Image: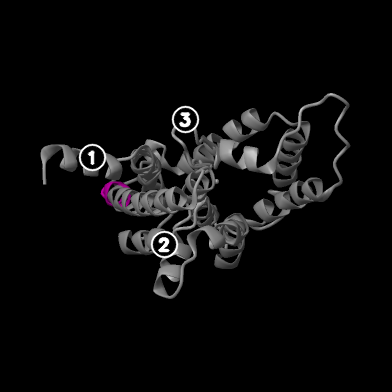
Amino acid sequence: MTFSQVRVGIGRWWSPVVRDGLGIGVATGTYGLSFGALSAAAGLSVAQTGALSLLMFTGASQFAFVGVLAAGGGPIAAVATATLLGSRNGLYGLQLSRTLGLRGWRRRLGAHLVIDESAAMAVRQADPDTARTAFWVTGLAVLVCWNTATLLGAVAARSLTDPAAFGLDVVGPAAFLALLVPRLRAQGQPRAWAAALLAGATALVATPFVPAGVPVLLAAVPAVALALAPSRPPRAGGSEVTVAGVAGAQVDGADVAGVDVAGAGVVRSECGR
């Protein structure tokens, strides 16, 4: 095998989609440091934090889960909130099932890797082979980087006498804002802003009267109602925005073309996932 043949082989393996997928894995994985610290501050052990991150493996749901527990909410409210946020991954799976064509144990592994980042990278590819490469590289990169960073963050936070003294108790809300604001800015639609404002107002009003974790569930009611409400017909001469375009542009609050993610990263990027 000549040097030129080796160089061509490496060039094919080290393709732009592989570089992007690995880059997304590293960028998204850094959020794991925040989650590990927040989980430790909420009272979970390092082993519990690692198991939660490995088995649940969807950033936004993980942040919501430990956030509810940290606020004094019960396990039912925490699970319900995490499930609500993670339900979007099922929709991603429906869209990716034909492209991936997985069977047996590969189907189970692939289902675990269906997150904002891997879905966003896969659906924006022009051909199925590249889409499959993008899915597996991104999903595995995020899996490794996210879980490694989670353990590092948990160990570092557990070594502190009082994590809240360093502001780690506000990591969760700050992460949610980091996911929300770019999404609203990118879509720029009145309905998206209305849903965010109504959901925030609902949670704020309900907080003094209901157990911790319940305001998050109540906040979903106006958001879902606005999502199901019929849209106004587009104005003459107006531009058409497709769902695929929106999904490709924003994932969990992160710009797919910029990092991308994500953020479906929210995919941030989000976090989340």
Other-residue count near label 1 (Cα within 10 Å), few / some / many at <14 / 14–19 / ≥20: few
Q: Amino acid at mark 2?
A: Leu
Q: Residue at x 45, y 69 (%)?
A: 107
User: Where is mark 3, residue-wise?
Assistant: 258
Drawn side of residue 81 relative to residue 16, left or right: right
Query: Which of the marked residues, 2 or 1, is nearer the chain's N terminus?
Result: 1
| Side of 268 relative to 220 (left or right) | left
- Residue type pointed to by label 1: Val
Name which of mark 2 and mark 3 comes first in the sequence: 2
Mark linked to residue 52:
2
Q: Main secondary structure of the magenta part?
A: helix
Question: Would residue 8 appear left or right of 240 to someone viewing this image?
Answer: left
Q: Which residue appears at 70% of the width and 46% of the height? A: 203
What amino acid does circle 3 point to? Gly
Q: Position of residue 120 (x, y in %)?
A: 52, 45
Residue 157 within the magenta-colored segment of the rendering: yes
Q: Which residue is mark 1?
A: 8
The answer to whether residue 81 of the structure is visible from this angle is yes
Estimate the spatial distance between the alpha carbons at disc 2 and disc 3, rounded to whole Å: 29 Å
Discs 2/3, front: 3
The answer to whether residue 92 is magenta is no
